[in-house]
Image (cartoon, helix red, strand yellow):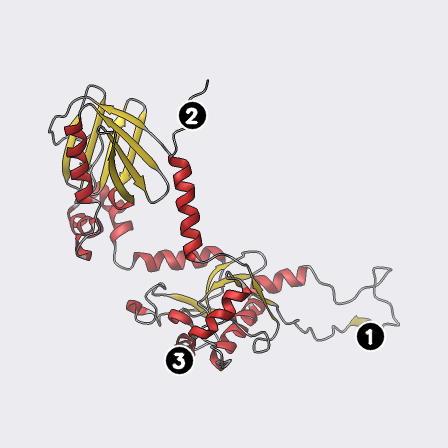
Amino acid sequence: MNISCLIWFHSKVCVTQVPFPLLQGECVERVGRAEESVIALTSYRLHIKLQENLINVPLQLIESVECRDLTQLHLTCKDCKLIRCNFLSAEQCQDWLRRISAVVRPPARLEELFAFAFLSCSASVSAEDREVHDGICRAGGHQRRFKRELERMGFDSHSAWRISNINSNYRLCASYPEQIMVPAAVSDQELENVAAFRSWKRIPAVVYRHQSSGAVIGRCGQPEVSWWGWRNADDEHLIQAIAKACVTDPAANTAQANGSCLYHHSSGALSDSDPHMANGSAEAEPKTTPPQKLLIMDARSYAAAVANRAKGGGCECPEYYPNCEVMFMGMANIHSIRKSFQCLRTLCAQVPDPVK
């Protein structure tokens, strides 16, 4: 949601009290007060309050800050929000411009991020806040949340799927989580080989499962096919294993059993002349599970995918992946998306004409 606020500050008083609870490790840098307004700058956020208007913005969410018309401060946020603050004097506006500009710059070191200060100071929290902070900062907490999410979606981690720790300490792929859900029939050695074939080592990993049908959604990087049409047996096996794991999933089998019928008779009953009847009992034909179709959705256009083959990339060849269909979505590249977002933000920043 786009927000544009107009706030006036008539005076400035240096105090250390702020009208909101501070997080662990959060330090107050500057506070300005007027009769009914407060502007506070901490090591984590910019807080502005005027009567019913309240703005609470993390510093790393602010993309740029500039002074306009001498007394007006414009803050542009990365989520397309625009904040306008009007001060009584140009000196006040310039003072806050310098202070905010100094803290919104990217940190010189990773350890300067507020998250590290929050983590180190959370060790000494009170007993009543211990549970809240432990849920955020406890070592390995993200792994427990990952397992709970898998249980919620109903993954069968005993036969069809398994959790792989091949990306422990992010050694395989820096942009993937440490634990990855993969078919149980695929070994970590095969995943290593697949990573060498996929761009940025982003192997096909399952990220979502439909609780009723058992259908899954996975993500991956483009295959490094190049002009030579390279292929990778382990990559092809992994793609097929994902489809087979959906078939062996208990929920998927239950859905198929409830929606299928071995025999169909117009009278609704089996007849004695049925060739599969023996001594009044029916012999079911061996049930053969139809091959599951796998849809590969490529966000690029077909032309862009083919052009990437010159750089060593490319797309999946349907001939190498049986029962797979490749669909190109035709999405523009990142530069076009960025330009579109900038145009949207410019439009939101425009002041509407007064109603006549």
Residue name at image x 33 percent, y 29 percent: 5
Name the front one of labels 3 and 2: 2
Instruction: Determine whether 205 is above or below 125 in the image.
Output: below
- What's under tag 3, amino acid-wise? Gln
Residue located beneath label 1 in the image: 279
Instruction: Determine whether 28 is above or below 192 in the image.
Output: above
Q: Which of 312 and 141 lies nearest the eye of the viewer?
A: 312
Q: Which of 240 and 212 lies nearest the eye of the viewer?
A: 240
| Separation of residues labelled 3 and 1 (CA atoms) | 53 Å
Residue name at image x 19 percent, y 42 percent: 101
Q: Secondary structure at mark 1?
A: loop
| Separation of residues labelled 3 and 2 (CA atoms) | 64 Å
Residue name at image x 28 percent, y 26 percent: 7
Give percent across and percent down for residue 31.
Answer: 16, 31
Task: Determine whether label 1 and label 2 are within 8 Å by CB.
Answer: no
Tell me which corner region of the image, top left, top right, bottom left or bottom right, holds residue 171. Answer: bottom left
| Separation of residues labelled 1 and 2 (CA atoms) | 88 Å
Give percent across and percent down for residue 107.
Answer: 19, 52
Name the front one of labels 3 and 1: 3
Residue located beneath label 3 in the image: 189
Residue located beneath label 2 in the image: 353
Residue extending furthest right? 273
- What's under tag 1, amino acid-wise? Asn
Badge 3 or badge 1: first in the primary sequence = 3
Q: Secondary structure at mark 3?
A: helix
